Amino acid sequence: MVNNPKDPVGLDWVKLPWPIKGSTNSNDRRYYIEGCQILYTQRVILPSHLRQITVSRIEMEDTEYITGLGLSFDDGTSTQLGYRSRYNSSVDIAAFGGFVVAVGTSGIHGLQIIDEGSHVSKWVGSNKRCPQTRILKLEEEIVAITASFDGFKLLSVALGRPLQRKRKWERSLLDTALWYPGLPPDNLRMKDGLAVGRPPTKSRHNLIFWVWFGGPGGSYLQYLTGISVTRSQGAFAGIEFHFSTGSIPITSRKLGLCDDKEGPDFAIDGAGGEYITSVYGKFAHSADQAQGLVVCHKQAPRVLVKADIRG
């Protein structure tokens, strides 16, 4: 194991797309606006088959954090990354496939461990009210782990895989993005390769907000009566989906910050079989916020709202 590695060469490292402040000797509070300070980093090259991971966690002000990772190998050796706590959970592994991660600006809150056949363990720690990502779920062999810590918790983790000249496929946004408020189902079909505004793969946090307004299997669509939008300072702040029944969960009703509106700005006859076929934004050449939003249903497109974001 190497502490504070400076040059992890010879491997392709897959990292979390989340900004954490690096080590600094400055006392300027501006250094701590985004995340916490990394005090040290550890890297381990896996010496043999990884058979068990023990995840330590702590709770601080009703929020759980991951504080350390214990790694046990088939050759009888073991390694501790970070800290140990009395609150820990162990997961046996047949073929380590990476992590599903719940992360915030103050550190990593929860982990799921991926095993053979893409089997995913229960959450260790918490996945509530924080972005989640599958970016550390890898198909290739994992040969190294790097972990960074502050004074008591895990801030960032990266997985090392052998270098390849050219990868055979591009990973889907379902796997590479940070999702909020939770992960979409991994069997959800997504149209990749389409950039809207600032592409998620180029944005600073790679964070995507989403709402499952149609529900499992489209079961909510028959109750959909329309859509309304909330604007703030000339830009879109939120989108609300209106339904004819109050049984639809709030997580399927609102995306972003929404004003309380009695009725929709754009009516949809869900009960009559009308449904949305596509949505696209209208952007200025130099802007990364939509000036207008066009929603197309099965008959004709309608302009939902057009806001001048320059004002």
Image: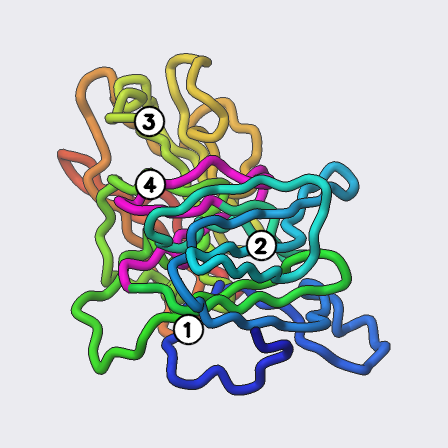
Q: Which dot, 4 or 1, sits closer to the camera?
A: 4
Residue on which disc 4 sits? 119
- Residue lying farthest to the right in this orientation: 27
Residue on which disc 3 sits? 215
Q: CA distance from mark 2 to mark 4?
A: 20 Å
The image shows residue 7, relative to residue 267, as above or below, that is below
Question: Which numbered circle lies on residue 13?
Answer: 1
Q: CA distance from mark 3 to mark 4?
A: 24 Å
Q: Nearer the viewer, residue 268 or 181?
A: 181
| Start-end of magenta stretch | 112-140
The answer to which quarter of the image holds residue 290 is bottom left
Find residue 125 and report its horizontal and vertical position in percent: 60, 41
The image shows residue 4, relative to residue 192, as above or below, that is below
- The three-letter amino acid code for the residue at tag 1 is Trp
| Numbered disc 1: secondary structure | strand
Residue on which disc 2 sits? 70
| Numbered disc 3: secondary structure | loop
| Numbered disc 4: secondary structure | loop
Look at the image and say whether residue 61 sits in the magenta stretch.
no
Q: CA distance from mark 4 to mark 1?
A: 22 Å
Find residue 3 and report its horizontal and vertical position in percent: 63, 76
Q: CA distance from mark 1 to mark 3?
A: 36 Å
Question: Which quadrant: the N terminus?
Answer: bottom right
- Residue lying farthest to the front in this orientation: 76
Find residue 85 and report its horizontal and vertical position in percent: 72, 47
| Numbered disc 2: secondary structure | strand
Q: Which dot, 2 or 4, sits closer to the camera?
A: 2
Q: Which dot, 1 or 3, sits closer to the camera?
A: 1
- The three-letter amino acid code for the residue at tag 2 is Gly
